[in-house]
């Protein structure tokens, strides 16, 4: 078993709008955390996060979804949130994240799943849909991507990868509170980010060793590390999803420079049944700035199915 750091529960005390009880899944000796709210026999909303976020990202969406009659699952990827932090940088890959998520879904025997994917939640979450399609009822795709030969990476994403290489700005600053403030101010699409948000996204980490997973997500973009980023499998999944015939709803923040509206529309056009809604003024992390609005849009689309 790899060496891990386990974040103290004290660091998560009194987080705003995050009253959820913790739940745990032992994955090969590594403790994985997930939120599980709502009736156990209800249809599932599976909320996938990316980097550098965790289940806290969905805190505004979980209560209204539960109120609407759903069971909400929001896992923390290993290395993030309340999950254990493997300290070996080389342990992390998109394949490891994907396998742990597969085993969690099977362990909980989830079915009738609506999956929310955004950021790295796209490659990890949509892998589950391709591998276990009978468990899923619909897709909600938000500001994410799947690698494939025709995909054109934005300059913003190329720059993001570069900034995380050893010796460069974000790798050296190790995502301090000030770097988080800068990052979220730009990517959430807000003029200013409340200090409580910075505190919450900094809470899971305690020193450089705990941030191996944080460092490896941006370094795993397939144009830079095809092996670590699962480039071949992502491309296969992109093609396989073209055969998806159940509901698929694209909900897109229009201020995202990483995954643009044009890309979102292009992807949605491959599904005859797809809907496409723009959240005006939302950046990359639309769950953070417009979570309630995302829920409203989705529930209306479900009513129209």
Image: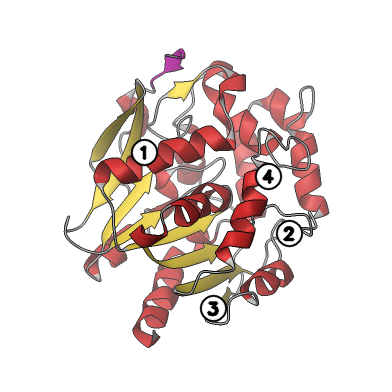
Q: How far apart are marks 3 and 1 (CA)?
A: 29 Å
Query: Can residue 201 be seen in the rendering of this structure?
Result: no
Residue 280 in the image: x percent, y percent?
60, 74
Query: Can residue 39 be seen in the rendering of this structure?
Result: yes
Question: Which numbered disc, 4 or 2, marks the residue that appears first in the sequence?
Answer: 4
Label 4 or label 2, whichever lies nearer to me, is 4
Q: In this view, does 6 lie above or below 66?
A: above
Q: Is residue 15 above or below residue 238?
A: above
Residue drawn at 50 percent across, 36 percent down: 97
Q: Distance between the residues labelled 2 and 1?
A: 33 Å
Residue drawn at 56 percent across, 63 percent down: 241
Q: How is the image coloured?
A: secondary structure
Residue drawn at 26 percent across, 64 percent down: 43
Residue 217 in the image: x percent, y percent?
62, 36
Residue 103, numbered circle: 1
Question: Which numbered disc, 3 or 1, marks the residue that appears first in the sequence?
Answer: 1
Q: Tell me the residue that label 2 is attached to.
A: 257
The magenta-colored residue range is: 2-6
Q: How far apart are marks 3 and 2 (CA)?
A: 23 Å
Q: Quadrant of the N terminus?
A: top left
Q: Tell me the residue that label 4 is attached to.
A: 232
Question: Which numbered disc, 4 or 1, marks the residue that appears first in the sequence?
Answer: 1
Residue drawn at 67 percent across, 74 percent down: 265
Label 3 or label 2, whichever lies nearer to me, is 3
Residue 274, numbered circle: 3
Callout 3 secondary element: loop
Question: Which numbered disc, 4 or 3, marks the residue that appears first in the sequence?
Answer: 4
Question: Which numbered disc, 3 or 2, marks the residue that appears first in the sequence?
Answer: 2
- Queried whether the magenta region covers residue 5, the answer comes back as yes
């Amino acid at each position: 078993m790899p060496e891990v750091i386990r974040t103290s529960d004290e660091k998560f005390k009194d987080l705003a709008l995050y009253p959820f009880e913790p739940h745990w899944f032992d994955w090969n000796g590594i403790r994985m955390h997930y939120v599980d709210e709502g009736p156990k026999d209800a249809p599932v909303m599976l909320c996938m996060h990316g980097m550098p976020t965790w289940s806290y990202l969905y805190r505004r969406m979980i209560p209204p979804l539960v109120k609407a009659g759903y069971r909400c699952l929001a896992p923390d990827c290993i290395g993030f949130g309340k999950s254990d932090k493997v300290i070996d940088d080389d342990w992390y890959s998109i394949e490891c994240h994907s396998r742990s998520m597969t085993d969690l879904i099977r362990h909980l025997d989830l079915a009738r799943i609506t999956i929310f994917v955004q950021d790295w939640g796209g490659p990890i979450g949509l892998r589950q849909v391709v591998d276990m399609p009978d468990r899923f009822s619909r897709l909600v795709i938000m500001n994410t991507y799947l690698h494939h030969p025709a995909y054109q990476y934005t300059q913003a994403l190329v720059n993001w990868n570069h900034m995380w290489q050893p010796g460069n700005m974000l790798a050296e600053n190790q995502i301090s509170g000030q770097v988080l403030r800068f990052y979220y101010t730009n990517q959430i699409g807000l003029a200013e980010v409340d200090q409580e948000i910075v505190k919450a996204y900094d809470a899971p980490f305690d020193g450089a060793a705990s941030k191996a997973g944080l460092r490896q997500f941006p370094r795993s973009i397939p144009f830079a590390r095809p092996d670590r980023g699962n480039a071949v499998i992502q491309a296969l999944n992109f093609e396989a999803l073209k055969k998806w015939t159940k509901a698929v709803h694209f909900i897109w923040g229009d201020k995202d420079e990483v995954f643009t509206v044009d890309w979102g529309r292009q992807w949605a056009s491959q599904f005859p049944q797809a809907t496409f809604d723009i959240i005006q003024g939302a950046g990359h992390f639309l769950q953070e700035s417009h979570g309630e609005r995302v829920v409203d849009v989705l529930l209306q689309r479900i009513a129209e199915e």
